[in-house]
Image (tube, rainbow, N blue to C red):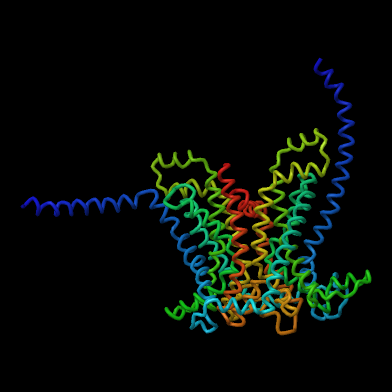
Amino acid sequence: MTTATIDKAAPTRTVKYGSMSRDRAWALRWSYFFLVIFAIFFLTPPIYMFITSLKSSAEISAATNPWWVFHPTLENYTGLLTSNQFLRFFWNSAIVSIFVVTITMLIAVPAAFALSRMRFWGSATLATGVFLTYLIPETLLFIPLFKMFAVVGDWTGVQLINRWYVLLILYPTLTVPFCTWIMIGYFASIPKELDEAAIIDGASWFQTLTRIFIPVALPGLIAATIFAFTVSWAQFLYPLVFTTSTDQLVMPVGIITTLIKGDVFNWGQIMTGALLGAAPPLIIYAFLMDYYIAGLTAGATKG
Amino acid sequence: MADVVLHPDRAATSKTVRKRGGLHNMLKRKSTVAFLMALPLILLIAILVIYPAFYALHLATLNKSMQRFIGLSNFEFLFKRETFWLVVKQSCIFAITAVIFKAVLGFIIAHFVHNIPAKGQRKWRGMLLVPWVIPPAMSTLAWLWLFDPSYSAFNYTLSFFGIGPIPWTGDEMWARFSVILVNIWVGAPFFMIMYLAALKSVPDQLYEAAAIDGANWWQRIWYVTLPMMRNIIAITTLFSLIVTFANFDIVRILTAGGPLDHTHIFATWAFRIGIEGSDIPLGASVSLFMVPILAVAAIFILRDISKRGNEA
């Protein structure tokens, strides 16, 4: 009886599905069409970077078809990768980013643990305050900070301006609030029973953090690490303001201030430098895309 | 008599004992441990964010050599300058136009990505997020080269359609268009990712119910998708408004404020005056003008977050 009704119903349903799937097929075709257009728009600059990086200066100034490489050469790459100055920029960037990631995690993880699990006086306000700090842009703070560090230099004799390590003090203001915020979200999603069990078994708060919270919230930790790294790698304003000597510069500022000499633009080298500067975040993104996206969306969806 | 003498003594000893015990207990207490764990964060925020913010207020009231208090003279001076009003206008045009286009474009692209089979979504999403991943300073260099006055690859392509060389960064209107275009290029993928995450969280049953009720494509978006995504749209837009309004990298590298200060926004102009022109108080006053709009956006975001906190 039941099979009969299903059989009867089946033909009409397939017909209906047929028309719907035809609609869907068209919707799909249009989707792909527009996605291709958007992909072209989004990928043109990086691809053009790559094309230009393979050209010699002679070919660039010959004003041939800019979208094609007629005589591919690696001279820009070898030129930059053997230049001590450029390697210095890369080294500075790497050191600064690695230190900033470490500092950020050492500050953010315990703070997030304290704010999400161990209430203390004003902890709720502080959690909101952390988020609010994340909303304060660096463009608002760079002038007072510049003056502050100059004054500190005058008072104590500790010269911070125009030293690469000043960035280790500055970058955490950009990375710590957001990392703390997303770690609070991840820690809050861990069931209370888990740490209660640990406490009953005699674990200290520190052990609860290192043995339970960090392993369980590892995806969040990776997302926060990626965020901290990409932010410190990409930061442009602070190094532009605080460092000027060529041996103290990081990648983005170094490429812009040293490769552009007056009105002479050596575009082949500039594009190669820009591509090499974009490479570390892109490589991390290529391998850890899901964590990267989790970190991006966590700020708004986990709150 | 002896009693009286003894009493304070005993009281004192018992007090110290209690005090030591109290200190010991306090160190062991949960809230103290928690406070100590959060202390580096509190110090960082207090010294490097809150203090400079108020220090900027103080700086804005000093004269150029920072010797003398001059009250609001810096602001009076700014209000009299034509460039200042140009910067205000351009900052608003820049932020509002860019955010609207980013939001709309992100919404459209998110829909297209959501439409295609789940298997291919990852690949497309990965490709479309690339502009957000590249450091903006680096990608703006590529745009600068694409906009080059004499070798512009865009002008080369457009010349085949008989459109003729466009002064991308040379003309005032085109330069405004260019900085907004680059900003949209950098920011639209972020909106796309946020909206895509929101789209995935809309239960399919709602669309099925709408389809049964005979809702067409537009009605489904208007009555199902948008209300379900309202929170994310609001928070992403407000957040992007803050970031775009406070933008520095793109304008600085692409036009450096030119031609004739027509593309300066608050951040780049503050840099020009405060760091390059070494008039720190005036630069601080300029950057302070970002505060009102940031505060408004922040209040809305906070309201939204606390609302969701109450729901949870």
Q: As drawn, is A98 to the left or to the right of B215?
A: left
Total numbered labels placed on residues in the image: 0
Tell me residue B115's x, y (percent). Answer: 79, 46
Tell me residue A204's x, y (percent). Answer: 40, 47
**Front in this rendered view, residue B168 or B293:** B293
Where A167 falls versus A301 (above or below)? Answer: below
Q: Is residue B32 visible?
A: yes
Q: Quadrant of the C terminus of chain B?
A: top right
**Front in this rendered view, residue B28 or A67:** B28
**Front in this rendered view, residue B95 or A171:** B95
Residue farthest top in this picture: A1
Q: Is residue A69 visible?
A: no
Where B118 falls versus B164 (above or below)? Answer: above
Question: Would you identify the image quadrant in which residue A27 lies?
Answer: top right
Q: Name which residue lies at 81% across and 58% down.
A: A38
Q: Name which residue lies at 76% across and 34% down.
A: B209
Where A100 falls versus B202 (above or below)? Answer: below
Tell me residue B117's x, y (percent). Answer: 79, 44
Tell me residue A182's x, y (percent). Answer: 57, 52
Q: As drawn, is A245 to the left or to the right of A55?
A: left
Question: Would you identify the image quadrant in which residue A26 lies?
Answer: top right
Residue farthest left in this picture: B1
Q: As drawn, is A287 to the left or to the right of B23?
A: right
Q: Name which residue lies at 66% across and 51% down.
A: A290
Question: Would you identify the image quadrant in which residue A87 lies?
Answer: bottom right
